[in-house]
Image (cartoon, grey):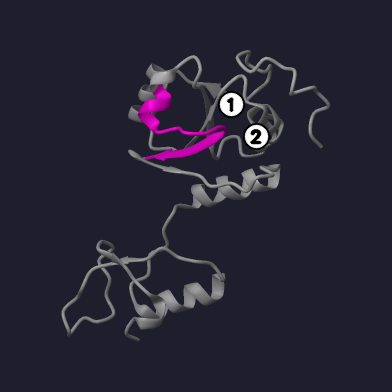
Amino acid sequence: RLPQRDWAREEMHESSKGSVIDDLTPESLSQRLAESDALLIVWFYAPWCKQCKLVRPALEQAAKILEGRVEFGRVDCAAYPEMKAEHGVYSYPAFKAFRAGQSRWIELPKGRTVADLLTASRREAAGPYSIASTAAELRTGVFLQKTVLEVLYSVQQADEPNLFSGVGEAAVVANLPS
């Protein structure tokens, strides 16, 4: 169950006692990204944003559940407008995953429940791509997992039709050689 606190009235700029979500500044985010390749999910928010206040308890709970496996941080974009501009934040709340020098936005449904946040966080922790070395492996992965895979490949020589290098254009599963 979510904490019985009046999150809508709570001041967003004050850290919650016992929170596992770190407050980030431009310096601390840069340092963290330079020192670690671990997955860091950053919540960009504004203290006046009602949706940010409403998502906070679910995010706090998800962060506690995933503590030790996924790191969470938050950026007050009202206090650090340069971070809003640098990271391309256009609306609140916004969530971005950082890992190994790469970043990508995390899409969440409007409800932004604990389950939604856990699903998105676990998906990011598992990595954005699945690697298949043959078209058969790729097809098997698509049908077994019942999920959409992003597949990258490059054009191969005619004598190596089933190998993928991992770079290039997106592949359409139905048109891959067997």
Q: Which of marks 2 and 1 is in front?
A: 2
Q: In the picture provided, is 154 more to the left or to the right than 145?
A: left
* Residue 39 visible to an observer of this rendering: no
User: Which residue is drawn at the image coordinates 70% and 34% (left, top)?
Assistant: 61
User: What is the x, y in percent for residue 37?
Assistant: 38, 37
Vertical order, 110 against 158 (above or below): above
Identify the disc placed on residue 29.
none
Task: Give the structural element (helix, strand or loop) at label 2.
Answer: helix
Q: Which residue is identified by label 1?
A: 21
**Which of the pair 162/83 is nearer the observer?**
83
Q: Which residue is identified by label 2?
A: 59
Q: In which quarter of the image is the C terminus?
A: bottom left
Residue 80 inside the magenta-drawn segment? no
Task: Give the structural element (helix, strand or loop) at label 1.
Answer: strand
* Amino acid bearing label 1: Ile
User: What is the x, y in percent for residue 14?
Assistant: 63, 13
Vertical order, 11 against 120 (above or below): above
User: What is the x, y in percent for residue 59?
Assistant: 65, 34
Q: What stretch is highlighted in magenta?
A: 83-99
User: Which residue is drawn at the image coordinates 24% and 82% (left, top)?
Assistant: 161
**Circle 1: is it few (<14), some (14-19), or many (20+) Cα within 10 Å?**
many
User: Which residue is drawn at the image coordinates 60% and 14% (left, top)?
Assistant: 13
Q: In the picture provided, is 172 more to the left or to the right than 163?
A: right
Occupied quadrant, residue 154: bottom left
Residue 87 inside the magenta-drawn segment? yes
Q: Quadrant of the N terminus?
A: top right
Vertical order, 107 against 135 (above or below): above
* Amino acid bearing label 2: Leu
